[in-house]
Image (tube, helix red, strand yellow):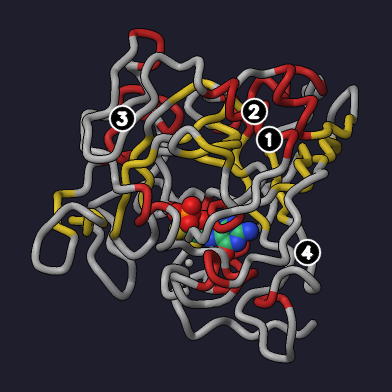
Amino acid sequence: MTFKPPKISSSEITPVRDWLRRREFLTMSAAFAFAAGLPREGHTAPLAASSSDYTVPDKLTPKKDVTSYNNFYEFGLSKDDPANKSDDFKPAPWSIRVDGMVAKPTTFAVENLLKLFPPQERVYRMRCVEAWSMVIPWDGFPLTAILDRVEPLGSAKYVAFESVVRPDEMPGQRGVFQSLSWPYVEALRLDEARHPLTLLAVGVYGETLPSQNGAPIRLIVPWKYGFKGLKSIVRITLTAKQPKNTWSVAAPSEYGFYANVNPSVPHPRWSQATERRIGAGGLFGSSRVPTLMFNGYSDQVAGLYSGMDLQTSF
Ligand code: MTE
C-alpha cells in the first residue's frame, strides 16, 4: 500500500455501545472484582498501599467519555467511530506472539495470560497527543511479567509492538485512502518496557476492555503521550535496533520515538504546556490544567532518561 502522510493529527480521528462480552471474559471480570472497591465515576481513585506508585489523586474521567471519545484509526477518523463502527470486531479468541531476540519465543493465548497474571486495579493519567487527557482506571498486569517468560537475550535493546490487521472487521483499514499504514506499530526501549508502570491492559473501569479501547489487550505507558499505547496487540518482538513507530513515520517532524509527556517541548502546531481534561466540567465539559513532566510520574521514571537531551529526543 502506498502511504501518504495523513493530513489529520493523531487525535482528530477515536467508545461504547454495549460490547458483547464473551463467556471467557466474564470469568476475567470476576477476577477484577477482587480489587478492594472498584473505582466509581466521579470518585477519587482508591489509593491502595500496593498501588500508590501508580495511582493519581485526580478525579476519574467518567466512563462514558473513556469509552466514547477514542482514537483507534482502524475504525475511522472520528472520535466516536471506534465505538460506533466496531460491532464486527472479534476480540476472542486472541493470541499474542512474543518473539525476536528471546530464548523462548512463545505464543500466548489471552485467556492463559489472565490465569498467569491476575489483573491488578490501577489508575493512570492517560494523555493524548493533542494536549487532552483522561484519568482512567485500567486493569492489567506489567508487561515485564511476560518478558520474563520469554527470556530476552543480552543483545535485545528494544521491544516492538504490532496491532491487528483485519480489514473485514475494521472499516478504517478498507478503501483506497488510508489514514495510516497498517499494522499500527509502536516500540519502547527494553528498560522502558521493563518498568513496572508499563502495563498490558485487559480491562477498564472493572470491566472487560471494550473494542474501542483496544480489546482484548493493549499497551499503557502512563508517562508518555497516548499514541504509544498501541491497541489490540498481536505481536511483541524484541530487537537490537530501534524499531519504527507509526506516528514518527507518518509525521517525523511532529512525533518522535520517545513521546515522553514534556510540557517544555511544544508540538510544532500547539503548546503542550497545558492539557484539556476531558469530562472535568467547564464550559465544554472539560477544563484546562497544567501539564506535568512525565505526566506526573517523574519520581518513578525520570531516571530512565538521565543524561539524555529530551528537547531533541522528543
Ligand atoms: N492503537 C492502534 N492500533 N490504533 C490507533 O489508532 N491510537 C493511539 C493509541 N493506540 C491508536 C492506538 C492514540 S493516538 C491514542 S491517543 C490512544 O490509543 C487512545 O486510547 P483510548 O482511545 O483508549 O483513550
Residue at x-position 49% and y-position 48%: 258
The answer to whether residue 169 is visible is yes
- Tag 3 residue: 298
Would residue 301 appear left or right of 165 to someone viewing this image?
left
Sequence-wise, which precedes: disc 3 or disc 1?
Answer: 1
Under mark 2, the amino acid is Met
List the residue tagged with mark 2.
28
Q: State whether residue 256 appears in this view.
A: no
Tell me the CA gap for discs 4 and 2: 25 Å
Task: Tell me which label, 4 or 3, sits earlier in the chain.
Answer: 4
Q: Which mark is residue 165?
A: 4
Answer whether labels 2 and 1 touch (C-beta < 8 Å). Answer: yes
Which label sits in the foreground, 4 or 3? 4
Which one is closest to the eye, mark 3 or mark 2?
2
In the rendered view, would you say 123 is above or below 174? Answer: above
Q: Earlier in the sequence, mark 4 or mark 2?
A: 2
Identify residue type, mark 1. Answer: Phe
Q: Secondary structure at mark 3?
A: helix
Local crowd at mark 1 within 10 Å, few (<14), some, or many (≥20)?
many
